[in-house]
Amino acid sequence: MTRGQPRVALATCSSLPTLGEDGPLLLDALAAVDVAAEPVVWDDSAADWASYDLVVVRSTWDYTTRREEFLAWARSVPRLANPADVLEWNTDKRYLAELAAAGVPVVPTTFVAPGERYAPPAYEHVVKPTVSAGSRDTARYAVGEDSSPHALALLEAGRTVMVQPYQAAVDVAGETAVLVFGGEHSHAARKAPVLDGTLDDPLKVGISAREASPAELEVARLALAAVPSAGPLLYARVDLVPGPDGSPVLMELEVTEPSLFLGLSAGAADRLAAAVLERLRS
């Protein structure tokens, strides 16, 4: 590190001390613009977060079972991207109701809190907790199949349940992930279906490059405009699926610690590094 060189911490978890697969690409891109960046485990008690000019949340993928601890850490970091209030909002998928109320086309979602009655729908549907990642504790149920045992187990554990009609078009089209850095569209990816029964491990979902359609970019714009944030986020991933009429609808808005698929698009890591540099200068 040279004198005066800005310092950036890329926050990760203890099981990925050298970051996920996006990490090396981002580290190289930051080095190319004279930013000294390093991975730091978010719950490392020895870390001096105030010594960094910016802390960027990346592969903190163990937060789902320790959400309150994670959010307390986020609030303690002097300069964090994305900011702690956005992380608090985004790490509970009840944010989908707020986006729908703001006019964003969202997969219809019903929420059931602990203590409330769960009535399994008769149509094909998906059940998952509102605090989760990587399709953990998520399952698809056929028409007439009883999802009550799954939902009740989550509710009895004190977790809020969300229920969505299964979007069958995803079995052919997959999901479209729209990546946005510093408020500007960077690239897009196709995520293969996770719940179609063809994957032994949902975390190994196939990813490939894709060009987002104008309609998909518009839904991404609407979703990001509805985020309760004072300004553009450093990074965002907008996950979209075709709705019943083929129009894109929002599945999830990932602005906490998403994979960004930097290896799928030439210059993607450089675009993210440029957004980091701009944030350092602001």
Image (tube, rainbow, N blue to C red):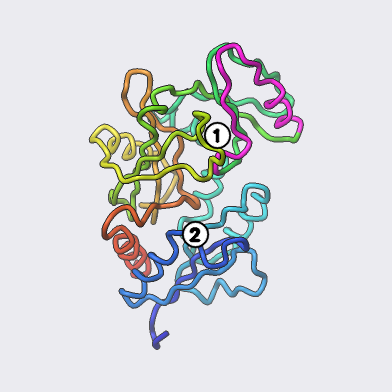
Q: Position of residue 242 (x, y in %)?
A: 36, 27
Q: Amino acid at mark 2?
A: Gly
Residue drawn at x 35%, y 57% as measured from the top left: 263
Question: For mark 2, what is the residue?
Answer: 20
Rounded to the nearest angstrom, the CA distance separating label 2 from label 1 is 27 Å
User: Depth check: 60 or 96 in front?
Assistant: 60
The local crowd at label 2, few if under 14, some if 14 to 19, many if 20 or more residues have their Cα within 10 Å, is: some
Q: Position of residue 120 (x, y in %)?
A: 63, 16
The local crowd at label 1, few if under 14, some if 14 to 19, many if 20 or more residues have their Cα within 10 Å, is: some
- The image shows residue 274, relative to residue 108, as above or below, that is below
As drawn, the residue found furthest toward the bottom would be 3
User: Depth check: 200 or 37 in front?
Assistant: 200
Quadrant of the image containing the C terminus: bottom left
Looking at the rendering, the stretch of residues picked out in magenta corresponds to 134-156
Quadrant of the image containing the N terminus: bottom left
**Magenta residue check for 167:** no
Residue 188 in view here: yes
Label 2 with label 1: CB-CB less than 8 Å? no
Question: For mark 1, what is the residue?
Answer: 94
Q: Position of residue 170 (x, y in %)?
A: 40, 28
Residue drawn at x 63%, y 36% as measured from the top left: 137
Element on which disc 1 rests: loop
- In the picture, the disc for residue 8 is none
